[in-house]
Image: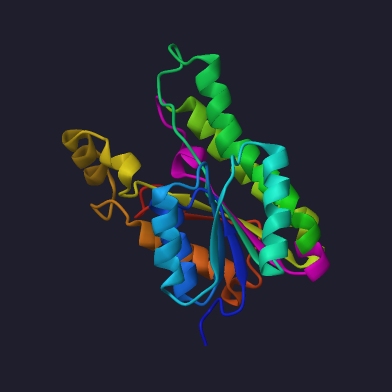
Amino acid sequence: MKLLEGKTAIITGASRGIGKAIAIKFAEEGCNVAFTDLAYDDIAKATEEEIAALGVKVKGYASNAANFDEAQALVEEVVKDFGRVDALVNNAGITKDTLMMRMTEEQWDAVIAVNLKSVFNYTKAVLRTMMKQRSGSIINLSSVVGVSGNAGQANYSASKAGILGFTKSVAKELGSRGVRSNAIAPGFIITEMTGQIPEDARKQWENSIPMKRGGQPDEVAKVAVFLASDLSSYVSGQTINVCGAMNT
């Protein structure tokens, strides 16, 4: 039997990158997938078709994860369309990197809203359904820079560190209701976002990692499958670093 057979997951920001890898891996394990992105465009449609080919129910939705009302409305729609929500993967995120001296209020606010407030928005939206089911797994995508900080990323680091405290608090509040909450902290993962880093800087990053390479989105997705499945039935309030020993 597949690990996520018969389950339904909501994955935010899943048209590409790590979110897409998680959506595909979930589908391969038999999970029905509701995924969101800022717009339901050609990329989202192609992702939807790719997931549908794996034989599960899938639907892509346009939603601004940073908007509280949109998150509530979307989860209500997913419950109508799919009947239940077994896993929520809060993956939506952006970067607006710059040194603190140059960082504007807009750069700070935008990153906090998309990366951190969205996690509150969607978690709040799924709680009633999960508590009624007395089961559910909330998986929040943090980052190793949320654990250890990084120069030029004060806004991003703050948003990802905030996710860790939120994750632990939710785990403590909802454990008695059968709802688990965990975080994944990826390190240097090869995606479109990291693909924009100059070659020499990328090599420098990779050399600083004990495993001497960047991670693949698929390697993060496998950990998300573990956390969404019954294999992790007694794992809650934890942060799993997926970083090739970069952050130990």
Horizontal and vertical percent position of residue 90: 58, 50
Front residue of this view, candidates 227 and 15: 15
Q: Residue at x 44, y 46 (%)?
A: 41
Horizontal and vertical percent position of residue 39: 50, 43
Q: Residue at x 27, y 36 (%)?
A: 196
On screen, residue 152 above or below 230:
above
**Residue 169 visible in the snapshot:** no
On screen, residue 132 above or below 159:
below
Front residue of this view, candidates 54 and 25: 54
Q: Is residue 18 magenta?
A: no
Residue lying at the far bottom in this picture: please name it: 1
On screen, residue 2 above or below 135:
below
214 horizontally vs 160: left or right? left
On screen, residue 23 above or below 119:
below
Q: Residue at x 69, y 54 (%)?
A: 75
Residue lying at the far left in this picture: please name it: 200
Q: How is the image coloured?
A: rainbow
228 horizontally vs 17: left or right? right
Residue lying at the far top in this picture: please name it: 101
Front residue of this view, candidates 23 and 100: 23
111 horizontally vs 200: left or right? right
Q: Is residue 136 magenta?
A: yes
Q: Start and end of the magenta stretch? A: 130-152
Horizontal and vertical percent position of residue 179: 73, 63
Q: How many numbered marks appear?
A: 0
Horizontal and vertical percent position of residue 51: 44, 67
**Residue 77 visible in the snapshot:** yes
